[in-house]
Amino acid sequence: MMRFAFIYICLAADFQLVLNSPTLGSKNNPRLLDKDIIKGVFEYQDHQNHSVFFYHEESEEMYVGGTDFVLKLDVDDYHIIEQFPLKTLEQQRCQEGKCKNVITVIEKFQDSLFVCGTNGKKPQCWKLFSSVNNQSHEIVESYEGRGISPFVYTHNSISLTAGGDLYSAAPLDTDGSSLQFRRKAGSRTNVWMYDNWVSEPTFISASWVKREEDPDNEKIYIFFREKNSDHNPEADPWISRVARVCKVDEGGSKRFFQNMWTSFLKARLVCGFPEESLYFNRLQDIYVLHADDWHETRVYALFTSSWNSTAVCIYTIAMIEEIFENSTFKGYDKDIPKPRPGTCVRNSRTLPLTTVNMVKDHSEMNDWVHSLHHTAPFYVSTNNYTKIVVDRVQAADKHMHNVLLLATDSGKIHKVLEAGSEAFIISETQISSRSPIQSMKLASKKKRLVMGFSEKISIMDLERCQQNMSCADCVLARNPYCAWTEAGCVPTVLGGIQNIIDGNRSVCPSPEEERKQINRTKRETASPSPVDLRTTHSVPLGVPFYLSCPIDSYHANYIWEHGGQSSPCLQMESNCLHLIPSMAQENYGGYECVSKEKDYTKVVKRYQLTEQIVSETNEDRNNNPLGNYVVPVESSAASDAVPHVEWITLGLTALGIFN
Ligand SMILES: *[C@@H]1O[C@H](CO)[C@@H](O)[C@H](O)[C@H]1NC(C)=O
Ligand SMILES: *[C@@H]1O[C@H](CO)[C@@H](O)[C@H](O)[C@H]1NC(C)=O
Ligand SMILES: *[C@@H]1O[C@H](CO)[C@@H](O)[C@H](O)[C@H]1NC(C)=O
Ligand SMILES: *[C@@H]1O[C@H](CO)[C@@H](O)[C@H](O)[C@H]1NC(C)=O
Ligand SMILES: *[C@@H]1O[C@H](CO)[C@@H](O)[C@H](O)[C@H]1NC(C)=O
Ligand SMILES: *[C@@H]1O[C@H](CO)[C@@H](O)[C@H](O)[C@H]1NC(C)=O
Ligand SMILES: *[C@@H]1O[C@H](CO)[C@@H](O)[C@H](O)[C@H]1NC(C)=O
Ligand SMILES: *[C@@H]1O[C@H](CO)[C@@H](O)[C@H](O)[C@H]1NC(C)=O
């Protein structure tokens, strides 16, 4: 039988209680609540309403665009390399505050940094050249930015550079309408969409999937959601899509469909439980994890639903291509013309009219793109995730593992291992308690996650490991960034001990062997294992008292053992408590806080309670009719020799424990 504990505590002290902390022992929890892994923080001078990040994998350069500036970050040796002001040149034209230049686009385009901003509702783009001797950028060219940058930052826009061309979607009108995905600049013809293809779209992402051996067949994939044409009141108002165009598409002939995509096709992107007709329809974010073989390139899609939970579904490009190449076309049952609509041809202007006409009128596929695990999403959560990136990590066993980094709307990052078809939630890290994550970028080679908030930029070191873990704890964590060696749980080194696939600690040395190894390498500073710390408290008879034990893993169950009996742990924040309403003789003696995770049982903490004789006079603890709990607050990692204890009084206003 499960035990539920409800506890409401009024605290005079200045630490906060989180009463909705995860239920212990559930796999739906992040296993760890990580601390201290934020590498650097840069606070903005002004509150940023919008920020955009750009990371160039080859040059390993990271740029951040805010209001009236672009800056370049050094993510290794955390600092700002340079800050480049980009104020609107329209200061006189508009009123106070309306003339901000909110940067919305940063791309590497034609060997320079290409930056666009709202420029006081007159979208503008600038090419910033980096001069060789001096690191500073300077504006060398400036263009009208309509169709690349939105007029206001709250409107939807996406951009992509691919093979020297710039693709973008941004409203053409100041009210946010006429939103189009277009090839906008570069060596090829500018091409745009036919209006009837989409209905009130929100573009999420566009991605170029290269085919080294077959460049003429390369496609640009566009991920978006749009208004559902099914107006049945039961139907979700939104529907999520993947569309694709050929990179070589130059539009139709002069007579028909000139400057329009002749290869545009779209299909429904399905994420949910098809057997129950339960779908997550609102595409929220996309991350494309490129593979050497394009078939294996994976698309990680984050969806939300009208019933307030989020899901991640995974697709491969091969699965998406399957639908575009083999499905029938919606609203069309005659013979499919040749070449099949959507086929990439070198000179799209010579395509037969029948093919182009069909793209124009029947660009939607009948078949849906189902996710990799088909009958269910890869991961479903009640967390309101807003952003996703995925890192590919080589673990100590030399195997590659995919790790999802999901941002919640409350400033947290969840690190989730893709363990086959199972999601394992490695950890949760609170990055900001004040605001949601506006944007985030992964610097995969550097193993850093850079996050933008309205008040700051934070950099998370993905390879930070909790060094003083035992081998079992390090293996149970299933964190591919870490492995166990004689020096403890450290950033992955080949040959380190780890078992990502099932977190089976049988790969660890025996406890005796492990202790010997640690003794050999232990440095002066390393702290002893917590089990070695037995804390002794002397407590007077009749006072309420509680014992506390830190929660190392939210996948474990915790119990308190005392006098041959065990009692459940009362969870408060990241601690497990044992409450003694009033000290009686039987409450003295030894206590052990024991955790059990899978087949691993460990004693996390030991206490010894001895009786203290006090004078009766100066106690006012009975003033509160519900009693006061006297709580020892230990100095860090309580040293046995000189128990340094401060006393805080908690007024316990209500306590009920039900079986
Ligand atoms: C953010 O928006 C608020 C309210 O619209 C505005 O007062 C503030 O100036 C904006 N911040 C920046 C940096 O533009
Ligand atoms: C670049 O040049 C500017 C002005 O010419 C100078 O102020 C700045 O210090 C130089 N920066 C570097 C990194 O040399
Ligand atoms: C979703 O959340 C909102 C706000 O928290 C709430 O008002 C609404 O009832 C929830 N809907 C469902 C289906 O749980
Ligand atoms: C389309 O279907 C055919 C026949 O079933 C199959 O051989 C082919 O591989 C499919 N195309 C793709 C891209 O999967
Ligand atoms: C989830 O987060 C998004 C983005 O911050 C927000 O628009 C939405 O209202 C949130 N949903 C819930 C149920 O809190
Ligand atoms: C690891 O050591 C640090 C200081 O050396 C200490 O603060 C921390 O509590 C220890 N963590 C564990 C799990 O023992
Ligand atoms: C761990 O692996 C060992 C040896 O392969 C096996 O006997 C044991 O059942 C596994 N434990 C778990 C929890 O899977
Ligand atoms: C490791 O060192 C501790 C004290 O530093 C000692 O008590 C213990 O016996 C040593 N263990 C082994 C296996 O050598």
Image: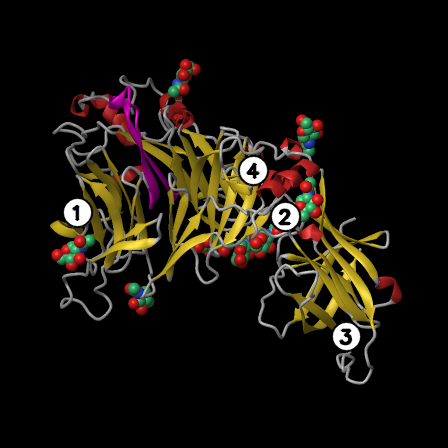
Q: Name the secondary structure under disc 4.
A: strand
N-term mark: 2 or 1: 1
Tag 2 residue:
553
Percent position of residue 190, x then y: 17, 36
User: What residue do we see at 28% from left, 26% from top?
Assistant: 218
Q: Nearer the viewer, residue 28 or 60?
A: 60
Q: Amino acid at mark 3?
A: Gly
- How far apart marks 3 and 1 lie (CA) works out to 69 Å
Q: Amino acid at mark 1?
A: Ser
User: What residue do we see at 43% from left, 27% from top?
Assistant: 367
Q: Amino acid at mark 2?
A: Ser
- How far apart marks 4 and 2 lie (CA) works out to 21 Å
Tag 1 residue:
130
- Asked whether the beta carbons under mark 3 and mark 4 sit within 8 Å of each other, the answer is no
On the question of residue 567 being in view, the answer is yes
Instruction: Please state if 347 lies on the left or on the right of 550 as rendered.
Output: left
